[in-house]
Image (cartoon, helix red, strand yellow):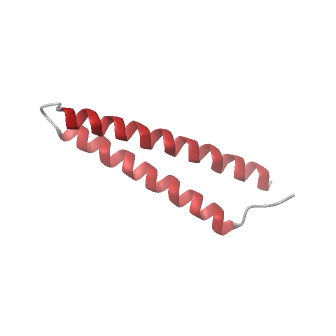
Amino acid sequence: MSVISSAARDRVIQVQEQLSTLQEQFEQQSQGDVLDSYEAALNRGKARAYQHAANLVSGALHDIDVKAL
């Protein structure tokens, strides 16, 4: 049985945090566009993509934690 190193786990956590930060950033940019322009729509799409990626990484982190038990 192989166990993931704590350094690798920390990198996964860092990626999750970065993705969440990017999701929030693009969500704020889309909400700041009062004209609801094409750019706002693109930013909403980017925010959703980063949110989905963060959820996938979160699931992987859960799998890592369960395997480590």
Residue farthest to the bottom, as pictured: 7
* Position in image of residue 19 (x %, y %): 45, 51
Which residue is at 45% across, 41% downward? 51
Judge whether 3 appears above or below 50 on screen.
Answer: below
Which residue is at 36% across, 40% downward? 47
In this rendering, position of residue 21 left or right of residue 28: right
* Position in image of residue 6 (x %, y %): 68, 67
Which of the 4 image quadrants contains residue 68? Answer: bottom right
Judge whether 62 appears above or below 15 on screen.
Answer: above
Residue farthest to the left, as pictured: 35
Quadrant in the picture for the N terminus: bottom right
* Position in image of residue 8 (x %, y %): 65, 64
Judge whether 43 appears above or below 16 on screen.
Answer: above
* Position in image of residue 61 (x %, y %): 64, 50
In this rendering, position of residue 42 left or right of residue 5: left
Quadrant in the picture for the C terminus: bottom right
| Number of numbered markers | 0
Which of the 4 image quadrants contains residue 11? Answer: bottom right
Which residue is at 43% across, 39% downward? 49
Which residue is at 49% across, 38% downward? 52
